[in-house]
Image (spheres, rainbow, N blue to C red):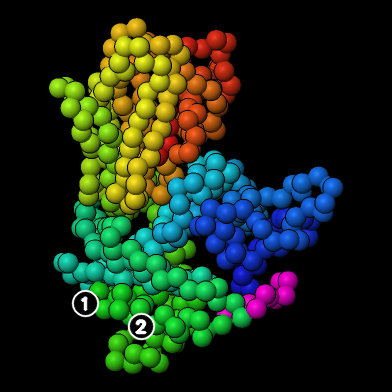
């Protein structure tokens, strides 16, 4: 997507302006907004209308589509993202990219490309270590492969597991702030400090694949430091090729990849009113790329009589601590009300969606109503106590009916 010098083609934040794309990605990973002083409005003047990092990347995608095909409406967009990109930033991108756009992990795309090219000699229990080298670190992902046969073809499907992902963080590998639109000059001494750590992370029988903007420099340094190891030449097109392969296979219903979702548990009480953790997304659950995990849990808990709100405590395997979500009720429950829970989750698709609704269909829950472009409810963040209901749809597919009765509350996790 990026031009060879690493700068964007698009024009944010000001007419004629361009951005170093590595910096935009880093802001997305950190979940931060822009802090550069030249983007801040002078004292006494209105706040500048500067785009978010997600808006900058979206503008770049649209610009690339127009240059490539001239049509942004019919093109299938697949954007490769780093392992470190949090759900909040995935949501920001999906909410701004052209309709139907999909995200895929960069390392997964590279592994899919490698498996397609190397299919004839992938043995049972074969592993691949992908080194994705960027300007702020190296992501190391180790994959195993699962054989799946469909339509008379054999597919070698990479399996992504969170415990086999590692990120070696470096200082920014720019020698200094590059002049606008010039080629950047990486400071390799900052990368050399981490070569032992990188080599140790891939020490084993796995085949190796290097990709990313710093892959050439990384391989040169690794060969010099560890000449006894066979470091293959980087594959500059693996991520792009794997992204296209992902869209191609999805369109035909063919296997893509498998991802182990983070497990998710809800704190509740059982039929004997004893507290327990209830598994909503089980541990080691594999989901196919592009497919959705959807499950309904009837009568998972109950709203007690005299209660005016429903509190939910959840924990996830890849996070420390707990998250609390509070749903305000439309009225105080006069009697005990059982509730159902619907869970929907995808790989590389933002937050899991958890929808709570009374088992008897009563309109006990309340919340703000939103229209969402993808017809998927948007929920509260993990710090406030707000909530929303399933969007009420008008005949044209967007907007609200008059006085709809809220029947469910949906939140993201």
Say above or below: 101 vs 299. below
How many neighbours does mark 1 have within 10 angstroms: few (below 14), some (14-19), or many (20 or more)?
few
Does residue 109 sit above or below 410 in this rendering? below
> Crowdedness of circle 2 by 10 Å Cα count: few (<14), some, many (20+)?
few
Query: Does the magenta-highlighted stretch encompass residue 407?
Result: no
Residue 78: percent from the left, percent from the top? 48, 52
Outermost residue on the front side: it is 306
- Residue indicated by mark 1: 205
**In the rendered image, which residue does mark 2 sit on?**
196
User: Percent x, y for residue 330?
Assistant: 46, 14
How far, Cα to Cα, is label 2 from label 1? 17 Å
Helix, strand or loop at label 1? It is loop
In the image, residue 273 sits, relative to residue 24, either above or below, namely: above
Quick one: label 2 or label 1, which is nearer the N terminus? 2
* Residue 232: mark: none
In the rendered image, the quadrant that contains the N terminus is bottom right
Q: In which quarter of the image is the C terminus?
A: top left
Which residues, given as a range, are shown in magenta?
176-186
Lateral position of residue 249 relative to residue 161, left or right: right
Residue 44: x, y in percent?
84, 47
Q: Is residue 395 left or right of residue 166?
A: right
Quarter of the figure with residue 395: top right
């Amino acid at each position: 997507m990026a031009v060879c010098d690493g700068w964007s083609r698009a024009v944010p934040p000001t007419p004629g302006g361009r951005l170093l794309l590595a910096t935009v990605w880093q802001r997305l990973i950190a979940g931060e907004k822009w802090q550069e002083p030249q983007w801040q409005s002078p004292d006494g003047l209105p706040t500048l209308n500067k785009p978010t990092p997600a808006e900058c990347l979206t503008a770049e995608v649209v610009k690339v589509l127009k240059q490539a095909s001239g049509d942004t409406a019919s093109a299938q967009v697949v954007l490769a993202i780093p392992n470190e990109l949090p759900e909040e930033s995935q949501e920001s991108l999906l909410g701004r990219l052209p309709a139907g756009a999909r995200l895929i992990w960069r390392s997964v795309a590279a592994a899919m490309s490698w498996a397609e090219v190397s299919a004839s000699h992938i043995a049972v229990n074969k592993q691949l270590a992908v080194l994705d080298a960027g300007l702020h670190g190296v992501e190391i992902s180790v994959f195993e492969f699962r054989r799946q046969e469909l339509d008379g073809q054999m597919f070698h499907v990479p399996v992504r597991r969170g415990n086999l992902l590692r990120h070696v963080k470096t200082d920014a590998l720019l020698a200094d702030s590059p002049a606008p639109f010039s080629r950047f000059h990486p400071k390799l001494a900052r990368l050399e400090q981490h070569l032992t750590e990188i080599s140790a992370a891939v020490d084993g029988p796995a085949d190796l694949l290097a990709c990313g903007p710093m892959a050439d420099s990384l391989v040169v340094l690794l060969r010099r430091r560890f000449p006894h190891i066979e470091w293959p030449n980087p594959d500059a097109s693996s991520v792009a090729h794997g992204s296209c392969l992902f869209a191609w296979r999805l369109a035909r219903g063919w296997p893509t990849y498998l991802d182990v979702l983070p497990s998710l548990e809800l704190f509740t009480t059982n039929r004997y009113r004893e507290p327990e953790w209830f598994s909503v997304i089980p541990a080691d659950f594999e989901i196919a790329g592009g497919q959705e995990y959807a499950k309904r849990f009837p009568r998972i808990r109950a709203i007690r009589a005299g209660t005016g709100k429903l509190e939910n405590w959840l924990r996830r395997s890849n996070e420390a601590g707990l998250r609390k979500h509070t749903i305000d009720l439309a009225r105080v429950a006069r009697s005990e009300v059982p509730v159902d829970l619907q869970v929907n989750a995808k790989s590389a698709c933002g937050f899991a969606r958890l929808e709570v609704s009374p088992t008897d269909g009563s309109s006990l829950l309340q919340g703000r109503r939103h229209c969402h472009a993808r017809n998927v409810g948007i929920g509260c963040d993990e710090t406030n106590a707000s909530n929303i209901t399933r969007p009420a749809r008008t005949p044209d597919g967007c907007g609200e009916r008059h006085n709809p009765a809220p029947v469910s509350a949906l939140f993201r996790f």
